[in-house]
Amino acid sequence: MDISSRVTVNTGLLAVMGVAVVIAPAVARQRAAAEMARAANEFVSSLTADQRTKAVHPLSSEEWTRWNFIPASMFPRNGISFKELNQTQRQRAHDLMKASLSQTGYRTAASVMQLENVLREIEGPSATAGAPPAAPAAPPAPAGAPPADPAAGERGAARGGGGQRGGRGGRGGDGGGAPIIRDPELYYLTVFGDPSAKGAWGWRLEGHHVSLRFAVDNGKLLVSSTPQFLGSNPAEVPYGYGPHTGLRVLAAQEDAARTLVLALDAKRQAIAIVAPNPRGFASGTTVKFDPQTPVGLPMSQMTPAQRDMLMKLIDTYASIMPADIAAARLAKIKAAGSGTIMFAWSGSTEKGHQYQYQVQGPTFLIEHNNTQNNGNHIHAVWRDFNGDFGRDVLAEHMAALPH
């Protein structure tokens, strides 16, 4: 399904039928929510009583808003890991992923998880396999504290000794003693509340470079799916690593942005490129992230072809989700005024070098950087200013959660 078909409504037909334009998206979201609830219930039903104690939490738990994207050995997760599941349970977990993501999204998330095997081969003896202990929910940050850059912890570890020898000359490490555990089974699933056709519930998948969560209010036919984080290390698997050589898990998100910035004429490019050196995430892993002062080139100042490129870039992130959820995201962007979306790039525009870009509109922020391992380590996130952690979908249910 292309972008225009996702966001364009046949207004003539709707006028004849006398129905609101929100009906079709609502029916589509109901289908997505029902599929998720079915898959979540089958997953939970496959668990033992002890496993359910680890995997199922109340929706009002502080655990709902606890998140990160660094390795589990650096930020221990709660929930139940794939390592703790038998074959049938693992299949149910993958069925839940498939029900909640598009085919592209499922393949992308699964590929990110499998990159742990590549990292273990690249890093050699410094990377171990195992299960670090889970940690209790961390206390909320003090009021007024600046957003933390979680990647700084990963960078700090990467400056330790005996680390990553792959990528483009970048070195990783163990943070001066504690090894970073590379294991594709150290991804944790957590279900919040009771998946049902009428109530409010949610679920998440977390581990190194994957942080995906879904808030569902089936009674209102709504689904929220942010923050959405995916990363790729290496961004491109270097030569010498068997069938994975040349793999670029987040190629679409990188290439679409570079295509856009290189398509700009000199005048527009001078506005869009805001800094010679890239930076880290502005949003960090804060629970609530407010709009920042917009920087870069407004969509309204782009040519029609450039606007289409920008929408295609946004769609590489939205299309991680099923078509109906992606359509709802794009419709929300359009309703808020797509002409005010800003595109900003910093760093080199040459492939293989460090760069960062962001796309900000009235309701959302996309941040993408490739600044570690000499430009071979991507972090990419979608934040919704009002909808992260289901705050727009589950407003009355979220009142008890920390702000």
Image (spheres, rainbow, N blue to C red):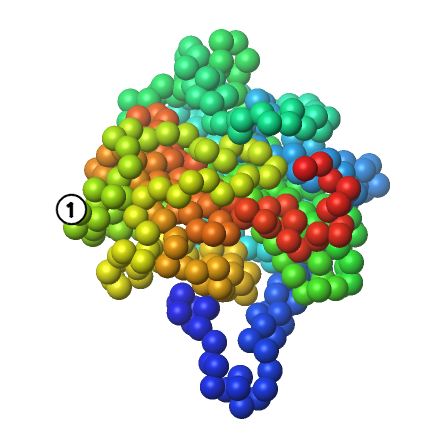
Q: Residue 52 location in percent, x, y?
A: 79, 41
Q: Residues within 10 Å of mark 1 (few under 14, many from 20)?
A: few
- Residues 13 and 166: in front is 13
* x 39%, y 25%: residue: 122
Total numbered badges shown on the rendered structure? 1
Instruction: Classify residue 96 as left or right of residue 356.
Output: right
Residue reaching furthest to the left: 266
* x 70%, y 53%: residue: 394
Residue reaching furthest to the bottom: 16
Q: Residue 25 location in percent, x, y?
A: 57, 70
Q: Residue 137 location in percent, x, y?
A: 71, 29
Q: Is residue 208 above or below residue 325?
A: above
Q: Is residue 246 above or below residue 183?
A: below
- Residues 268 and 321: in front is 268
* x 36%, y 19%: residue: 171
Instruction: Classify residue 363 as left or right of residue 386.
Output: left
Question: Secondary structure under badge 1?
Answer: helix
Q: Residue 285 location in percent, x, y?
A: 55, 33
**The C terminus sits in image quarter:** top right
From this viewpoint, is residue 265 visible? yes
* x 69%, y 40%: residue: 64
Residue highlighted by disc 1? 266
- Residues 195 and 289: in front is 289
Q: Is residue 255 above or below residue 19?
A: above
From this viewpoint, is residue 239 visible? no
Instruction: Classify residue 259 as left or right of residue 366.
Output: left
Amino acid type, label 1: Ala
**The N terminus sits in image quarter:** bottom left
Q: Is residue 80 above or below residue 343?
A: above
